[in-house]
Image (tube, rainbow, N blue to C red):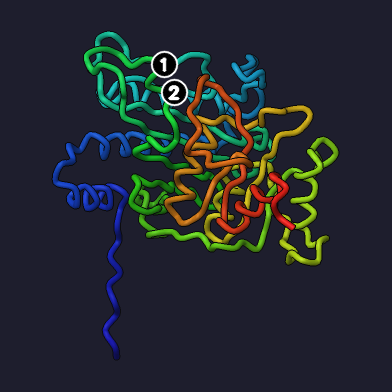
């Protein structure tokens, strides 16, 4: 009988420590910040799993800064992430899609050197129908004087300045995927031991995707160039092979699928949202950083998302993200360069 092969189980903590040892200059502060986020994800996951049994479905009542109705689970996720980040001494300031202004740590807590921008629960309109939802985060180093709390200027940095970004997908299994600029790695949550375990090391996305994700209900409101692009994705132009339509209305879920199997997610500008609908700092930039670290590309339709210098905390942007060939086709079609 052949001896069984031992498969090393790698927790997210062990993986982050191993990565830290590759950089002797590291202080461990970023590693601990990632642990803080992983802990918040575990807490949110426990409530997502109980959403149908506990009193956390439905609207919480208030409208957020985006003008959207806040769901109860949105509110819980937002407070959970803030509590995890603001009391550990690793952040100078945080900003959430749900809050109108940046938030500094309480006066009696230490100030760290990092800035965290996050969407606490993306796809919250899917909560009540038991579809996949997610959390998205971006991490920057502060750029202002380090002696006091962080300021708005610390939050308004281009995506190219991110030191880490990631997302958590609460679906058939819960996954945390992140990058610190050295590849993309995915961890699946094992509830029996309460740990995120390495399941997807060094994710690489295909250069050409087999599917496209876009809300075609907005087709009449798109520019003629965007309509042409989607027709090409559908194979209605014989010069371009047809792709399969895959769209759930949950950004994290659609992005995750396309990252693993190849594809392009599009949220173009339209007559209702001429500046785009997705938030640059909380959604577009972190997902762009992750995608490009996996060999993909992200654009606002005219150029790289990561090059955009934000001017407002809740700035919106169009987004085309995924397999590099498909996103380049989007840019060329919108610019009128593609045949």
**Gap in Å between the C-alphas at discs 1 and 2?**
7 Å
Horizontal arrangement in the rendering, residue 264 relative to residue 221 (left or right):
left
How crowded is the residue under tag 2: few (<14 C-alpha within 10 Å), some, or many (20+)? some
In the picture shown, does residue 296 fall above or below 105?
below
Q: Position of residue 32 (x, y in %)?
A: 26, 36
Q: Position of residue 93 (x, y in %)?
A: 36, 20
In this rendered view, identify the residue nearer to me: 210 or 249. 210
Residue at 66% across, 31% down: 276
Find disc 1 in the rendering and name its residue.
152
The numbered mark at residue 298 is: none
Find disc 2 in the rendering and name its residue.
156
In the picture shown, does residue 40 fall above or below 212?
above
Q: Which quarter of the figure is the C terminus placed in? A: bottom right
Give the image quarter of residue 278. Answer: top right
Horizontal arrangement in the rendering, residue 173 relative to residue 128 (left or right):
left
Which secondary structure lies at badge 1? Answer: helix
Residue at 81% across, 66% down: 238
Which secondary structure lies at badge 2? Answer: loop
In the picture shown, does residue 77 fall above or below 295?
above
In this rendered view, identify the residue nearer to me: 30 or 291. 291
Kindly check if marks 1 and 2 are in contact, taking CB atoms under 8 A apart as contact.
yes
Q: Position of residue 147 (x, y in %)?
A: 22, 14
In the rendered image, the residue lying farthest to the top is 107
Residue at 15% across, 42% down: 25
């Amino acid at each position: 009988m052949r001896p069984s092969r031992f498969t090393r189980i790698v927790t997210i903590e062990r993986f982050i420590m191993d990565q830290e040892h590759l950089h002797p200059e590291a202080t461990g502060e970023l590693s601990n910040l990632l642990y803080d986020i992983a802990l918040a994800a575990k807490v949110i996951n426990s409530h997502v799993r109980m959403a149908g049994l506990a009193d956390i479905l439905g609207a919480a009542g208030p409208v957020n800064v985006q003008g959207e109705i806040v769901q109860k689970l949105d509110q819980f996720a937002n407070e959970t992430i803030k509590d995890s980040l603001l009391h550990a001494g690793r952040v100078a300031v945080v900003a959430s899609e749900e809050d109108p202004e940046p938030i500094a740590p309480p006066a009696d807590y230490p100030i760290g050197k990092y800035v965290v921008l996050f969407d606490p629960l993306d796809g919250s309109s899917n909560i009540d129908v038991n579809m996949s939802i997610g959390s998205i985060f971006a991490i920057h180093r502060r750029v202002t004087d380090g002696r006091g709390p962080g300021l708005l200027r610390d939050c308004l940095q281009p995506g190219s300045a991110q030191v880490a970004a990631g997302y958590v997908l609460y679906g058939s299994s819960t996954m945390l995927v992140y990058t610190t600029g050295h590849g993309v790695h995915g961890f699946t949550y094992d509830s029996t031991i309460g740990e995120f375990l390495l399941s997807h090391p060094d994710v690489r996305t295909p250069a050409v995707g087999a599917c496209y994700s876009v809300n075609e209900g907005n087709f009449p409101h798109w520019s003629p160039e965007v309509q042409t692009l989607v027709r090409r994705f559908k194979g209605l132009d014989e010069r371009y092979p047809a792709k399969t339509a895959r769209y759930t209305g949950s950004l994290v879920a659609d992005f995750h699928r396309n990252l693993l199997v190849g594809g392009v997610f599009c949220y173009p500008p339209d007559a209702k949202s001429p500046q785009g609908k997705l938030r640059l700092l909380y959604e577009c930039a972190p997902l762009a950083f992750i995608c490009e670290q996996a060999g993909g590309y992200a654009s606002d339709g005219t150029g790289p998302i990561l090059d955009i210098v934000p001017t407002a905390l809740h700035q919106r942007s169009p987004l085309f993200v995924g397999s590099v060939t498909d996103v380049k086709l989007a840019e060329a079609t919108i610019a009128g360069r593609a045949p």
